[in-house]
Structure formats: structure tokens, C-alpha cells
Image (cartoon, rainbow, N blue to C red):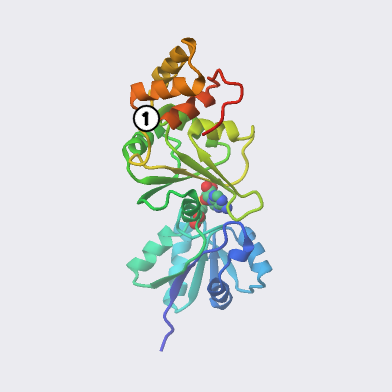
Amino acid sequence: MQKTGRLILVATPIGNMADLSFRALETLCSVDLIAAEDTRHSGKLLKEYNIQTKMISLHKFNEAERRQTLLQLLSEGKQIALISDAGTPGICDPGADIIRACIAEEIDISIVPGANAAVSALAVSGLSDKPFTFLGFFPKKSPQAVLDEISASIYTTVFYEAPHRIKKTLQLFSASLPSRQLVLVRELTKYYEEVLRGTADSLLAHLPAEVKGELVLIVQGAGEAPPEIDREAALSLVNAFLKRGYKHSEAVRLAAKELGIKKNALYHLTLDQGLSNEENPVSE
Ligand code: SAM
């Protein structure tokens, strides 16, 4: 009887090589072929684990063309593992095309699950107890439409973002959702792993001139967030109380009460804007 072919999606580490699972290792060693997003990149993983299996490239530029070759091998009963440069193949990575082709041809597909940057970042964000929306990379085109959706969404939103774009993206959040709680997760599982929490302005204040590494941005859902502050109105009201001689914290309390907004959010906003008459205002 002819062996049944199978496409096996194998998750690989998102930074720390030790995160390859035993079953992933076993699978990569035993399949007939590994289809990899970048054979040079994955060559390092294969070398590290002494995996001898032959590789073939499958990336966004040759995915359609490779489909026939892979379908032919699968129909001959070959077992093929699909891996991407990092994490779970098919999630913002090549793979969807061959996966759909296998479904259409009734070829078995299975998965060896493992690392995924979005879900890992969501877990450390502390915002994972609510339903979430994963939007892939933050859109370069028409970002305002997405910001408006997030503004109304009660779900936690998860984005991938490039280091050279993160400041621009945070500036957009600062303009549209200034008091929304964000979590910026950088270089998960790697040496410079970092989790920053705060509003867009406070994250911008933390970031170095040149941001490096891989990033996931998590946005708190609207239901959880305090109502958006009309920044100008709020700051000018605090300023008015300061001018009347109130201490910073008292001016914030009075302005927050008058505007029906959370005192803490306004306090941080005034600190971000350098608005205080106290020597060393304490971040609450
Ligand atoms: N398939 C991958 C997965 O399952 O996570 C995602 C691939 S996508 C092309 C790559 C993006 O994932 C990066 O630009 C970054 O936004 C995010 N990413 C990957 N590794 C990461 C890490 N170690 N820390 C933070 N974000 C990461």
C-alpha cells in the first residue's frame, strides 16, 4: 500500500534555540523533506540540532511555483515539514498557499505546535484574560481606520511592528488613544527581552533614539480603559488650577473630578507633558 503523504507544520523558536520541542526535533529528523522560508536561516537551526534532512525553499516569492512540486511529492506519499524563519508557519509567514492547496487536494495536514510571538507577547502583557484580535503587522496604509476600530473595540488587540516604525505608530496612538494602556514586548526569549507598559506617550519617553529588535504591540480593549481624555481641555484645566495655587496632585484631582475622568490617567498625562509645580512628583 502506498504511504500517505502529509504536510506537517512545525513551529520553530522565536529567538531562543532551546525552545524547539522534542516532537519538532523528531519530526524534522524523520520527514523526507523540509520546506523552509529561508534555507540559510533555518540551516543554523538544523546545524545546531544535527538534523540531516534535505531542505527546499518556500517563500512568498516562489510559493505559487513550489506548490506543484510539493503537491507532487505529497501525492507520492512523502512527508514534508513546513517551517518558517521563526515561530509558527503560516502566521504572518509563508505557508497559507500550500496549506490551502493541500486542503483542496485532500492531503493530510498536521501541526507540531510551539512558539508564536503574538500569543507569547499577549500572555506576558497581562491583558490575556479578555478576547483578543490579532491584526498581523500594523497597517502602513490608512492606519486611522484601524485606530478608530480599536478605539471602539472591547477586545485586546495584538500587532506585529517593525523597529523602524514603532515610534511613528506610537505617535498615532498618542494622537488618537492617548490614555489607552499599551504593552510593548521586545525581543521575547532573547538576551534583550523587555516588556514596557504604559500609555503611548510614556512608552515614547522610554524608547531610545534607535529602537532595535523584534516587537509586538498589545493594546488594551476599550471596555478596560478609562474614557479617552480630551487632552487639551484636561491639561488646560489642570494648568488653571495650578495657576490658582493648587498643588499638582490637588489640581489633577479637581480637574479629573470636573471632567469625569480617571485621576491616574490625567496624572500621568500631566507628568508626560512636564506639567507639575512639585519638585519630584511621584508616579502613582
Ligand atoms: N510566524 C511568526 C510567529 O509565529 O510568531 C511571526 C512571523 S512575522 C514575519 C515576524 C514578526 O513577529 C516580527 O516582525 C515581530 O513583530 C514578531 N516577532 C517575532 N519574534 C519575536 C520576538 N522574539 N519578540 C518579539 N516579537 C517577535
Residue at the top extreme of this rendering: 244
Nearest the viewer among 221 and 118 is 221
Secondary structure at numbered mark 1? loop
Looking at the rendered structure, the number of numbered marks drawn on it comes to 1
**Around disc 1, counting alpha carbons within 10 Å, would you say few (fewer than 14), some (14 to 19), or many (20 or more)?**
some
Residue at position x 58%, y 31% from top?
205
Q: Specify whether tag 1 is near ligand 1 (CB below 8 Å).
A: no
Q: Which residue corresponds to mark 1?
A: 228
Give the residue furthest to the bottom: 1
Residue 119, image x, y percentages: 46, 55
Task: Name the residue located 39 percent from the left edge and 18 percent from the top edge.
Answer: 233
Q: Is residue 62 visible?
A: no
Which quadrant holds residue 52?
bottom right
> In the picture provided, is 110 more to the left or to the right than 196?
left
List x then y, in percent, for residue 157. Answer: 40, 45
Residue at screen point 64% across, 34% down:
208
Query: Measured along the vertical axis of the image, is residue 137 above or below residue 271?
Result: below
| Residue at 48%, 77% in the rendered image | 78
Q: Is residue 111 above or below residue 227?
A: below
Q: Is residue 263 in view?
A: yes
Left or right of 44? Residue 175 is: left
Near-viewer residue (282 or 128)? 282
Indicate the amino acid at tag 1: Glu
* Quarter where residue 75 is shown: bottom left
Q: Nearer the viewer, residue 218 or 245?
A: 245
In the image, residue 112 above or below residue 210:
below
Residue nearest the viewer, comparing 283 with 113:
283
Residue 118 position, x and y percent, is: 47, 52
Residue 174 is situated, as x and y percent measured from the top left of the image, at 46, 29
- Image quadrant holding the N terminus, namely bottom left
